[in-house]
Amino acid sequence: MSSNGTELPKAKDLWYKLSPEALSRRPSPLKTAFKYAVDPRIVSLGGGLPLPAYFPFESISATAPEPPFSTYNNAELAKDAPMISVSVDRYNHANDPGVIPLATAMQYGQSDGCKPLLAWIYEHTKLVHNPPYSNWGCLMTVGNTQGLDAALRLLCSRGDSIIAEEYTFSSAMETAHAQGVKSVPVKVDLEGILPDELDAQLKSWDGPLPKFLYTIPTGQNPTGGTLSNERRKAVYDVLSKYDIMIVEDEPYYFLQMDTYVPGISDKAPPTPPTVQEDPKKYKTFLSKLITSYLSLDVDGRVLRLDSFSKVMAPGTRLGWIVGQEPLIERLTRQNEVSIQTPAGFSQAIVYSLLSKWGQDGYLDWLIELRKEYTHRRNVCLDALNKYFIEPSSYAPKGLGEYVEWIGPTAGMFFWLKFDARKHPSFGKLSPLEIEAQIYETAIEHGVLFIPGSWFRADQEPVDVKAIPGAGDDASFFFRGTFATVPQEQLIRGVELFAETIAAEFAAK
Amino acid sequence: MSSNGTELPKAKDLWYKLSPEALSRRPSPLKTAFKYAVDPRIVSLGGGLPLPAYFPFESISATAPEPPFSTYNNAELAKDAPMISVSVDRYNHANDPGVIPLATAMQYGQSDGCKPLLAWIYEHTKLVHNPPYSNWGCLMTVGNTQGLDAALRLLCSRGDSIIAEEYTFSSAMETAHAQGVKSVPVKVDLEGILPDELDAQLKSWDGPLPKFLYTIPTGQNPTGGTLSNERRKAVYDVLSKYDIMIVEDEPYYFLQMDTYVPGISDKAPPTPPTVQEDPKKYKTFLSKLITSYLSLDVDGRVLRLDSFSKVMAPGTRLGWIVGQEPLIERLTRQNEVSIQTPAGFSQAIVYSLLSKWGQDGYLDWLIELRKEYTHRRNVCLDALNKYFIEPSSYAPKGLGEYVEWIGPTAGMFFWLKFDARKHPSFGKLSPLEIEAQIYETAIEHGVLFIPGSWFRADQEPVDVKAIPGAGDDASFFFRGTFATVPQEQLIRGVELFAETIAAEFAAK
């Protein structure tokens, strides 16, 4: 049902998009017998399930902060933060709906994920994205890296191509590369994909069209860019016109940030209001989130990759894919013969916690994280202004003529664009040779930034010797992150890199 | 080093066995920067790792039985079983080597698995299998289903073939099928592969040789067969002669059993001796284990798939592959762009438990499980004798003329072979039609057994109408398990199936 109560149409039939591998998957006949194995009227000597009594785990438990959260103090959990404990026993004799007992979670089971967790994810997805067609579904993965591997196997064969942002997550490109799938870069600016360029590129495409767009629209890795709602709609329309699928990889989606104001990081971040102080708190939070491709997806051509890796912990190895049911069914067949299902410990602990927090409590957690990441982003941008723009002992006129950036509004990354033409070695060294030299110099100087060329979507060996004459081609980039180190080190890291840049460009 | 102290030779160079997919995998350049990211002299704004302070898990803990184990009573953990608790905190300020703190376990990290767990697995593998070449290694998987998926991607391309036991784990065959890899059955008897038949089959092989043998040599699924040491050596030699790889899938390896003596299930299973009572307890246990292909593998042509699924719980989603290092390196590259690594909760909890138990404690656990599974096997075989062989109200002469089996010596399964020629519909119905009819009749009668044809290695649609004249082709099979239901239900299930068989064959 749509929000105004009318029945939504079904997704387009996109079965013809499936790869031979995906088409050939057959349900396990053993799974057809599963309905008898759980029928209490039937003694099952069918499935090879070990008795839960033989699992050497009587119970597990976890301690976690309690909502509403105002629990962080300079990126450390406050000592007096109120905590809750969740506990999962071997059996669930009390039939607590907030628990997946170990006898279930640790047993072979549903390949799309434990039912209660899946239902929770479905409810969350409806709340946040409300896809505009009726037959959508979800399936658990062990994270977005595996989610992309699965999407590639679902839609591509060796020799096919996909398109991706010009600079993108290099592991994603390597996932495609090893499957024999070529990544073709799409032109971006510091915000993200340029819809007109995309249209022109597809119009003049040589050979079979790419199978899908792989995109990280929010807090992009590596550029930190977040595509505006308008551009998302335009990109969707272009891809719909050429009948191309979209895989949106959104690990950073909830790390969207408040507006940056220079100097703001001196103040402690404001504590989010409680629901008593602002009854519309959750509605406001949800309404401010950027429009996902999934929520624009009238055709059912989007596979959305979501994950707890960045909003809980990478080691949960819990992600999920949202898409039209016929594709989710194929991915379930794929799970059956690869990962089976995410780890039971993860599903049991995370479900217990989510179930205790509730949907609102989870939003509270995300609001708290947003506050923390906003503050870290502010610290980072203030440090960039201080060490790169303001005059300093190592750069009396500042470094503004060599470098530019836009302040990220989501994610973990910032992206510095340098003008190689201003470097004293320009002409003798190519921009990428200068980039490589700065990478090494920075490490010698005690700071690690990642060279932008490592994220090139095409991932062919780069000819670092090529020396362009002028123009855009004389740019190079570095990726930094404000997520990984404590605040003091973040500031120190920016300072060290500024010193490196000053020394590198000084001889000019 | 070998056990007599001489340096072992390296494995053969089998790089030419790799698939184009495996050959094309490249290490992530980001991983090359990882050494700087963990260098305390360098401020890393490099990797996109969320701060562990933001993981909403302060600590996790698990309660488990304590070794030595004499803790089970009719497949339920005794109420007074001594228990231990393992606890894992966010940080490991005490530097306890028995703990992988959540800050590490739940972070992005080593794609081959958390180092301490991997070291434990390595030590265990050395203790149990002691591979006869020097450069072997291990890598964590999320279970053997994914391990096989990885092995197929490592060694096969679409259009290739593998060989497998004539009846085998159907999901494994489906894994191959979807990758476009054809499974060709190898003739077996009730024990397993017949080496001479294998030799003859490969000698007259038409086209490119199969890429590997997929085999479950111990407690095979579905037949329950365990190949003898002599036959294993012979099979290895045949495959070495034709230069074919071996993937041994050994989830049931430690569920090896003591000898069956009819009527023995009336007695409670004997409690294994303590180490005080038998100081050679562990040595004896290890020496009685059947020879793995890995321990015969002078060439380095074996990939061994091992797992905690059947000896701890399927939901650990923790398995591992042992093989020669160059292949393990390729599989690590594959992990990087698919599963990344098993769930941190699983690695942290299981490692804490193993580390508290110690290698000997883990062997104690396996000895206890072996005792339990031996007893369940005994109960099952006694029930088969009672309801199928002894005269009964529904079968005054017993059912011995219709059915045969061999008592399994490992695993979870038993395999009943029926003679279709004795069925009243033989001639009108094919053996497989009779099998299908019995499957349905059994369900109506309240018991689930799985038809043998569901496990055919070739997995092509079976022509159930084909009516063979006589001979072996007039056999059909059913798989049962003694692992899944409590003892009383196991006995009842066998009785119900015997009644079904009696009614089915009665009209003759």
Image (cartoon, coloured by chain):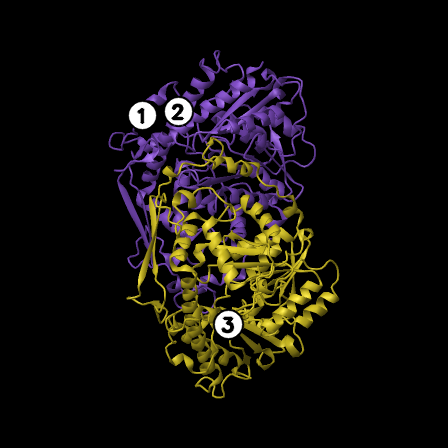
Chain colours: A yellow, B purple
Q: Eyeballing the image, is B487 above or below A255?
A: above
Respond whether the residues carrying marks 3 and 1 are from the same subunit.
no
Question: CB of mark 1 within 8 Å of CB of mark 2?
Answer: no
* CA–CA distance in space, label 2 to label 3: 63 Å
Q: Quadrant of residue B258?
A: top left
Judged by depth in the image, the label closer to the viewer, 2 or 3, is 3
Count how many numbered circles sit on residues in the image. Answer: 3
Q: Is residue B213 visible?
A: yes
Residue at 53%, 57% (x, y): give it: A144
Residue at 36%, 43% (x, y): give it: A91
Kindly state the secondary structure of the residue where label 2 is placed. Answer: helix
Q: Quadrant of residue B377?
A: top left
Q: Eyeballing the image, is A198 above or below B477?
A: below
Q: In this rendering, would B10 be left or right of B263?
A: right
The label on residue B268 is 1
Q: Amino acid at mark 3?
A: Lys
Kindly state the secondary structure of the residue where label 3 is placed. Answer: helix
Q: Amino acid at mark 1?
A: Ala
Foreground residue among A375 and B304: A375
Foreground residue among B323 and A339: A339
Q: Amino acid at mark 2?
A: Val
* CA–CA distance in space, label 1 to label 2: 11 Å
Foreground residue among B421 and B40: B421
> At which x and y percent is residue B406?
48, 21
- Which image quadrant: the N terminus of chain B? top left
List the residue tagged with mark 3: A288
List the residue tagged with mark 2: B379
Q: Dot 3 surroundings within 10 Å: few (below 14), some, or many (20 or more)?
A: few
The label on residue A373 is none
Chain under callout 1? B
| First of labels 1, 2 by sequence position | 1
Chain under callout 2? B
